[in-house]
Image (cartoon, grey):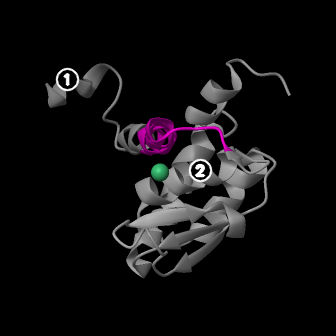
Amino acid sequence: MFLKHSPTEFFKKGDAVNEKDKSKVVQLILDGEVEKALKIVCDSYGRKIPKLKVGKVKRHSKALAVYVPRKATIFLSKGSLARNPFIILHELYHHLRFSNGKHKGTEKYANEFALSFIKSYVLNFLKKKGATGKKSNQFL
Ligand SMILES: [Zn+2]
């Protein structure tokens, strides 16, 4: 695969997923179709889909969500978080960046990864509403 950026950039910007699919991924999560959303992103990166479970993880009982590499599982402290695109995509980044038992990203990059999807979703939403382009000064 041709990489425009370094591997780290490639991951933190979510570059394996096109803008249209990024927007769709966020919409699917909001709609409660998290499994389909995980599949689109994992397929784009050629990775298996992580499991998703509701429950607390020892030593991380205060965390909203935790990715446990040993189990390739994202644990959510509450079921309702399955509809939170930021949390799901942040944890999914950890899943994508684990290989050979090592994590190659940071919390900051996990946030950037999640935000790159949310940005596509918001821009697409505004486009649909006709709020971008020459007449966008209604927001000034
Ligand atoms: Zn994290």
Residue 83 drawn in magenta: no
Label 1 Cα crowd, 10 Å radius (few <14 / some 14-19 / many 20+): few
Which residue shows up at 42% across the image and 68% down it?
60
Label 2 Cα crowd, 10 Å radius (few <14 / some 14-19 / many 20+): many
In the image, is residue 3 above or below residue 89? above
Which residue shows up at 49% across the image and 75% down it?
57
**In this picture, residue 15 sits left or right of residue 75:** right
Query: Quarter holding the N terminus?
Result: top right
In the image, is residue 9 above or below residue 120? above
Mark 2, ligand 1, within 8 Å: the answer is yes
Residue topped by disc 1? 137
Query: Quarter holding the C terminus?
Result: top left
Residue topped by disc 2? 94
The secondary structure that most of the magenta stretch takes on is helix
Residue 115 drawn in magenta: yes
Badge 2 amino acid: His
Badge 1 amino acid: Asn
Figure quadrant of residue 85: bottom left
Query: Residue 34's x, y, as percent?
Result: 57, 68
Which residue shows up at 38% across the image and 67% down it?
64
**In this picture, residue 101 sits left or right of residue 34:** right
Which is nearer the eye, 137 or 38? 38
Which is nearer the eye, 134 or 85? 85
Figure quadrant of residue 17: top right
Mark 1 and mark 2: Cα distance apart in space: 38 Å
Which is nearer the eye, 57 or 93? 57
Q: Secondary structure at mark 2?
A: helix
| Magenta residue span | 103-121
Query: Residue 7's x, y, as percent?
Result: 70, 27
Q: Secondary structure at mark 1?
A: helix
